[in-house]
Amino acid sequence: MLKDITIGQYFPGTSIIHKLDPRVKIVVVAMFIASLFFVTSFWPYVLIVAFIGTIISVAKLPLKFIIKGLKPLMFIILITFAINLFLTKGEVLLELGPLTITKEGLRQSVFMALRLVFLITGTSLLTLTTSPIALTDGIERLLSPFKKIGLPAHELAMMMTIALRFIPTLLEETDKIMKAQMARGADFESGNILNRAKNLVPLLVPLFINAFRRADELATAMEARCYRGGDGRTRLNELKFRSRDYVVLASMVVFFGLIISTRYLVS
């Protein structure tokens, strides 16, 4: 299960999606997230599926890799589905003891589950097609106007990128610790949810120790390279908008504007 988590991973490539300015991709993802919360009917989801499918195809990302990233979050998706299915009032379709399934609840549960799937898939495309260094530079440049009000743009960008970068590393550490514990007789798969949660407690101490150790090693490495923050820092590759970036950004503004407008055009 831990190996299925793709959050924070980068899939190298030479496609036009990979070559886009990271600022453009960050802004497009922000518009994508905003548009999802404006959708009130199912048919705009067709446009969103087409958008995600086009990105996956152009970026040449394996579809199995994208689907695999949804598996660890399937429990949350199912919980969201169940809550909306049984707690939404309306025309009763089926009664299961104290629980009732309504027509409105069935629609709402499917709608919210799809929204969650699209949200996870769409946002994961950002890290899959953007290297950590480019992502750091993009976030910092987007936050740089807020430096005038005292916002530490460089530090925030660095922290966010390091957090994303170390998600796969910590998951790998967790998997190694679990295998070591299982070799010593630990059982993480049998029993109910509460028992499984209790069995995971012994993982926390070595995981936290390894996390702090890696943080200390990272800090030492940064100091050894004379890292002093963003003040006076130069970049090997300066971010520059190209014609393709302007075309993609303008197209996405129109596309997501169309999706958002469906909230007001469809009754």
Image (spheres, grey):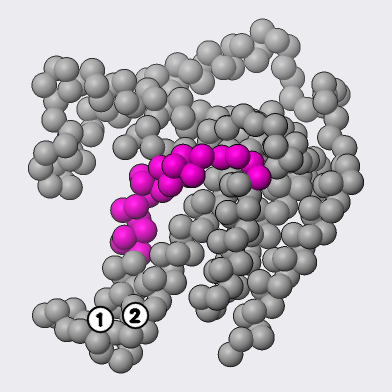
Q: Residue at x 24, y 87 (%)?
A: 93
Nearer to the camera, 88 or 59: 59
State which region is magenta: 58-80
215 part of magenta stretch: no
The amino acid sitting under disc 2 is Gly
Q: Residue at x 78, y 40 (%)?
A: 21
Is any part of residue 15 visible from this angle?
A: yes
Question: Residue 179: horizontal and vertical position, in percent?
Answer: 24, 21
Q: Give the position of the C terminus as an image quadrant.
A: bottom right
Q: Marks 1 and 2: in contact by CB < 8 Å? A: yes
Question: Residue 89: horizontal and vertical position, in percent?
Answer: 32, 86
| Number of numbered discs | 2
Disc number placed over residue 101 in the picture, else none:
1
Q: Is residue 136 above or below residue 221?
A: below
Question: Residue 9: horizontal and vertical position, in percent?
Answer: 53, 33
Question: Residue 176: horizontal and vertical position, in percent?
Answer: 31, 20
Residue 170, located in which quarter of the rendered image? top left
68 part of magenta stretch: yes
- Main SS category, magenta section: helix
Q: Secondary structure at mark 2?
A: helix
